[in-house]
Image: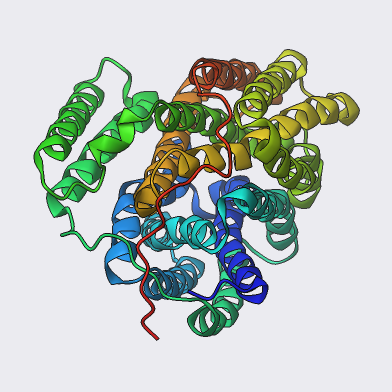
Amino acid sequence: MNDSVAHRGWTLILASLGVFMTALDTLVVANSLPALRESLGAGLSDLEWTVNAYNLAFAVLLLTGAALGDRYGRKRMYVLGLGGFTIASAAAAMSPGVGALIAARGVQGAAAAIVTPMTLTLISEAFPAEKRGAAIGLWGGVTGLAVALGPVVGGAIVGGISWHWIFWLNVPVGLVLIPFAASRLDESHGARAQLDIAGLLLAGAGFFGITWGLIRAGDAGWNSAETIVALALGTVLVAALVGWERRTATPMLSPKLFRSRGFNAANGVSFFMYASLFGVLFLMMQFLQTALGYSPLAAGLRTLPWTGAPMVVAPIAGALADRFGNKPFMLLGLALQAIGLGWVAAIAKPGMGYPQLAVALGVAGIGISLCFPTVSNAVVGSVDGADMGMASGTNSSLREIGGVFGIAILATVFAHSGVYTAPSTFVDHFKDAVWLGAAFSAIGLIPAAVLPGRVSATEPRPSPVLSATG
């Protein structure tokens, strides 16, 4: 493999741009939810599926995406994933109704499930252990840039043109990125094990059932047969997935990864952090527009203290974690996010002034910035080199499942028959949901507290299995 500085630079740029495109798409949609509700006549459950169809397909297929990269080549699958994402974005832009949009979003999520784990694995392979934290920090900073720009770009497009163009935006980016990735990245492989199709089907059906039950609980009620059956069946299938993964010779979710305390703790942090972040973000963009009366663009700009912080803080946190370890940054980050979101819940009211809200969002923004790179660094640093693809895929999957869980639970708390009829009604239920989002961040402090202490970056670790294919 070419270990030159130029190669590392190209790898970091191309991998970061790939994750930028997939992250930007999620957050562009978040700011477009009020427009989608008006344009397509979508209800709250439709809005949830517009976001969660992407997140759920992403979560379920991430581990398969990582395995495909290990088996068929990480560069090859990265390029194919970018192509699929670009095509699905065009389909979403041309959707004639909410059902077609949800379907296209699911395909986008499937393609993103191939792109995302490849980005972290490509970077982890290209950089030595002592420089990996800084590289992942820059990768996290680019992700933070997508987080920051998503609401702003979405607001500008929705306010100035129409919601369809938030998806057209991905097409030229993909068309430029694909040929550069094909020509500049080195090919590599992991263990070429047989694909775990049974595990994929169990995971897809199980998590779909749980998500369906959580989303439908707001309309059908927690005591309805539909909700109870969906949640029960989903839980049984997920339990069957765990049993299958313990028995099969080629698991997509290797049980040996969960023997590492560091791996378990980092993934616990990731789950609760993203449950909090995604759940509150789903409602925050609606709060700014529906309860406070801001335009889509103005709402996007007013989230910058929260969503823009990772651009500055994440690269610094990643570099400092190489010296001081990941644990203190995760603890502080989760605490700050819990404090910031709790502050938002405490002060939210119709017609409130912006400065106080900006300070609270800024505190939460610094919190997520400290967690973004350190969680990823802790995950890849807790496993052998040959398992980095599966480890990063598992982490990304649990992150997205946490996001699905957070959106579904917070939306259920928020849901009310007249919630969109008056700002005061909206805010009352918004406050309840955001308090719960703050609680999710606080719960994340528990796994963060049991994370092992700093491991030396110079400690020998097995290298990934690599092979050049052209």
Q: Is residue 290 visible?
A: no
Observer-nearest residue: 223 or 41? 223
Horizontally, residue 244 falls left or right of residue 338, namely left
Q: Position of residue 206 (x, y in %)?
A: 22, 37
Q: Position of residue 449 (x, y in %)?
A: 54, 16
Q: How many marks?
A: 0
Residue at horizontal 48 percent and vertical 20 percent from the top: 447
Residue at horizontal 57 percent and vertical 45 percent from the top: 458
Residue 457 higher or lower than 466, as above or below: above
Quarter of the image with the C terminus in it:
bottom left
Report which quarter residue 142 is drawn in.
Answer: bottom right
Report which quarter residue 243 is drawn in.
Answer: top left
Observer-nearest residue: 387 or 57? 387
Q: Is residue 421 visible?
A: yes
Q: Position of residue 166 (x, y in %)?
A: 61, 63
Residue 100 higher or lower than 185, as above or below: above
Observer-nearest residue: 34 or 240? 240
Q: How is the image coloured?
A: rainbow
Observer-nearest residue: 199 or 383? 383
Q: Position of residue 468 (x, y in %)?
A: 39, 78
Horizontally, residue 269 falls left or right of residue 24, namely left
Horizontally, residue 465 falls left or right of residue 16, namely left
Residue at horizontal 42 percent and vertical 51 percent from the top: 54
